[in-house]
Image (cartoon, rainbow, N blue to C red):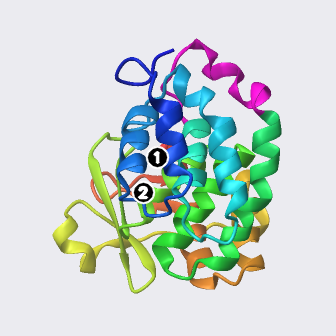
Amino acid sequence: MRDVYGSAADIPALLDAAASATDWDAPAWRVLWLRLCHQGSVAPASYAALPALARIAESRADLALDPALFLAASIIASKDGPPEISDVRNVYAAQITALRPVAEYKLELVRKRPDVLYALEVVAAFEDLSIWQRDLDRLVNEEVELDCPSCNHYIYLGLVDGALVATADRDAVGDGLPVQPADPGGLGAAEARLLALCRAHNHAAVSRELLQLFGQATCPHCGATFSVADAMA
């Protein structure tokens, strides 16, 4: 069996070492991330590691930011892997089912804005919530970069005092065009679920950001209005 870089012969030993480590910078976790989900790419060993990762994550549900849970979610959400990637949700349905409540519980434990977004993305992975299982973390640094669907020019969305604005120049966000938030009553199933999770776990500020991420932006180059989510996909 192979991981992203080659033979996966020592992955079981690395998983054993990682089971007692909660620090993301622990050597075992650093190597596991590199070899099981490197920049979103996965391999057969990544899937074979899912039962062990699930056991580790279930054993420490009170750990707010658990590398085991996040790695499992990233593997499940990946679109860059071997042929068996198409059936991963069926093969590992038991692990995914077990990790869903663990993932949602993290939303009770996190408070910092970036941590909330990361925790939401993990839930999105286990629940297969559209592009958000891979792209929600693009908002972590209070910015989203994309291309206008109409003219293909670069657009920078920056967060200014909780409001997303669109500009052609990241140094000119003060003059950006405000993003129109989505109507909560008109959201798709994936977006409605993420908004409901925010509200259920008292993350009001993040819920306001999500409505903007799910909303409409105006291109500063050509003036076209477009769905932010569609442009991110």
Tell me the kind of residue under disc 1.
Met
Image location (x, y in percent) of residue 4? 40, 25
Q: Mark 2 points at which residue?
A: 138
102 vs 55: above or below: below
Region of the chain picked out in magenta, as a range: 78-92
Of the pair 72 and 55, the residue shown nearer to us: 55
Q: Mark 1 points at which residue?
A: 232
In this image, 193 relative to 114: left or right? right
Tell me the kind of residue under disc 2.
Arg
Image location (x, y in percent) of residue 25? 35, 59
177 vs 10: above or below: below
Image location (x, y in percent) of residue 28? 41, 47
Q: What residue is drawn where x is 19% and y is 73%?
A: 172
Reply yes or no: does residue 220 show up in magenta: no
**Does residue 141 show up?**
yes
Q: Residues at badges 2 and 1 in contact (C-beta under 8 Å)?
A: yes
Q: What residue is drawn where x is 76% and y is 43%?
A: 96
Crowdedness of circle 2 by 10 Å Cα count: few (<14), some, many (20+)? some
